[in-house]
Image: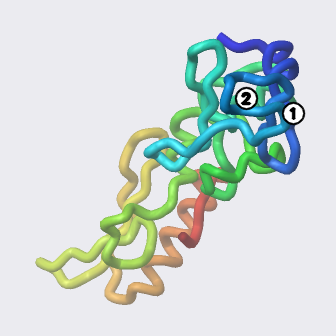
Amino acid sequence: MITQARALELFEYRDGCLYWRVKPAKQISVGAEAGCKNSHGYSVVRVDGVLYGAHRIVFLMHHGYLPEYIDHIDGNPLNNKIGNLRQATNVENCYNRGKQSNNKSGCKNVHWKAKIKHWSVEIQVNKVKKYLGIYKDLELADLVAQEARDLYHGKFARNGA
C-alpha cells in the first residue's frame, strides 16, 4: 500500500494532474504527466508494481490517508482536482452516479410503465428502493425524483445528467 510520503516523493500535483518527480522508466522522463486512462475512464498510475487510481494518489497526497471510496463531485472520473474529490461511502458514491446509459425517459430515477401508460419514480435510499408514485406528466415525475434525491441523498444528490 502506498504511503503519503512515497506519493510525495514520486509525484508533483498541479491542477488535478500528477507529474513524475523521478524517472520511473527508461521511456518516461521527470516532469512527464503520470498515468493513463483505463477502460472505465479513470486515470491510473503504477507505483511499485501496483496500479492506483490517480484520484486516490491525489487524495492521499493532500489528506494523508486513503479512504475506501473517493467520490468525484462532478461525476467526471478524469477531474482529479482536489476540490472535486471527497471521501464517501459506497452508498454515497452510488447516489452521485449519473443516469443509466439505457435510460429512455431522459430523467434519472424516472421510468415509463407501458402497461399503465404512466411514469414511475423510484430512488435508492441506503440500498433499498423507495417507490415515489406514478405520474402522467414526465416533468412532474422528474421534479418528484429531484426533490427526493435532494432530501434523501443530501450533498451526494446528482440532479441532471
Residue under the point 42% across and 40% down: 127
Q: Which residue is mark 1?
A: 12
> Quadrant of the rendered structure where residue 27 is?
top right
Q: In terms of depth relative to the viewer, which is nearer, 104 or 51?
A: 51
Residue at the spot 59% in from the left edge and 61% down from the top edge: 158
Q: Kindly identify the amino acid type of the residue bearing the numbered disc 2.
A: Ile
Give the foreground label among 1 and 2: 1
Residue displayed at 65% across by 19% down: 47
* 152 horizontally vs 65: left or right: left
Per the image, the residue denoted by label 2 is 57
Mark 2 element type: helix
Is 21 situated above or below 43? above
- The amino acid on which the numbered mark 1 sits, given as a three-letter code, is Glu
| Badge 1 density bin: few <14, some 14–19, many ≥20, Cα 10 Å | some
Asked whether residue 155 is in view, the answer is no
Quarter where residue 61 is shown: top right
The relative height of residue 28 versus residue 93 in the rendered view (above or below) is above
Q: Residue at x 50, y 42 (%)?
A: 38
Report how far apart the C-alphas of labels 1 and 2 lie in the structure.
11 Å
Rendered-image quadrant of the N terminus? top right
Q: Could you say which quadrant of the image residue 104 lies in?
A: bottom left
Q: Earlier in the sequence, mark 1 or mark 2?
A: 1
Q: Secondary structure at mark 1?
A: strand
88 left or right of 60 in image: left
Left or right position of 138 against 58: left
Name the spot of residue 14 as percent of width and height, x first. Answer: 87, 44
